[in-house]
Image: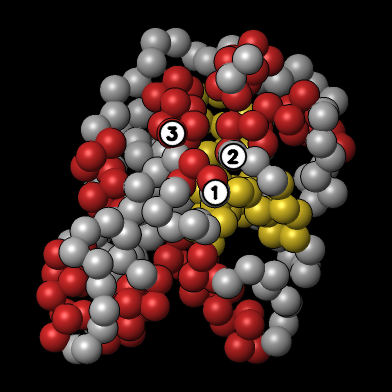
Amino acid sequence: MTDISALIRLCPPPGNPMVIDWEVVEAALGMPLPSDYRQLAETYGPGRFNDYLAVFHPHGVTEYVNLTGPMSARIRGQLHQQERQGRFPVPHDPDSLFAIGSTDNGEYLFWITNPAEDPDRWRITVNEARGPGWFDYDGNLTAFLASVLAGRIRVPLFPKSLTEQTPQFTPSHPVLYKPAPTPDQTPTDTNAIRIWAQANGYSVPPRGRIPPNVRQAWEDAHRA
């Protein structure tokens, strides 16, 4: 049984699959996406599991749950700030973390984007909302959701009540969302980044994902 089949059996999706232009989405992000996430996003659409856990989606209804919105860059900036201030230890390189979901309590789910060019090998990590705790899961996002909702794994950062109810998915109305540029937002014009990087002595591949240090340098150079 595939991961998406296990999740569907456990928590039926709301309706017909959604059509998503993944070429446009990946171009906006400047990176490829895991195949399990594509299936998950198409099957369920935007919404929340057990009224607690929201997975970011290309058609997310607000910037806070939109995959191509500014949240991932903002959260990464917060992690860097925590490291500089010595507040909470971050067990992973913040530049390797891409926020993919959030909870009502303020935890964030991340992809650990290593290796960068093989997204189907990306693992999942979750950080504590207001504390130093982290939880790593050695598997993809869809398998993580199925395991959590079925009670096969216990995430200490999540409330016990999360698995004390019948798994359900509550959809939000899908709308196309195009976020306005902000100082914290990862730029979407990857060609412009490559041109700038080459002009400033950075080594970048001719296609594929922009290295995190180059993205950070671009953001720093273009920060208002």
Judging depth in this view, the residue of 182 and 67 nearest the camera is 67
Q: Name the residue under label 1.
A: 122
Q: Which of marks 2 and 1 is nearer the N terminus?
A: 1
Give the alpha-carbon distance from disc 2 to disc 1, as whole Å.
Answer: 6 Å
| Residue drawn at point x = 39 percent, y = 78 percent | 213
Residue 16 showing in the rendered view: yes
Q: Name the residue under label 3.
A: 35
Q: Name the residue under label 2.
A: 140
Q: Is residue 40 left or right of residue 29?
A: right
Quadrant of the rendering where the C terminus is positioned: bottom left
Helix, strand, or loop for circle 2? loop
Residue 63 showing in the rendered view: no
Q: Which amino acid does label 3 sit on?
A: Ser
Instruction: From the top left corner, tell me how far across and down residue 125 is, in percent.
Output: 66, 53
Q: Residue 219 carries which label?
A: none
| Residue drawn at point x = 58 percent, y = 15 percent | 5
| Residue drawn at point x = 68 percent, y = 72 percent | 90
Callout 2 touching callout 1 (CB < 8 Å): yes
Give the alpha-carbon distance from disc 1 to disc 3, as whole Å.
Answer: 11 Å
Instruction: From the top left corner, tell me how far across and down residue 219 is, in percent.
Output: 31, 78
Instruction: From the top left corner, tell me how far across and down residue 164 is, in percent.
Output: 85, 25
Give the alpha-carbon distance from disc 3 to disc 2, as whole Å.
Answer: 10 Å
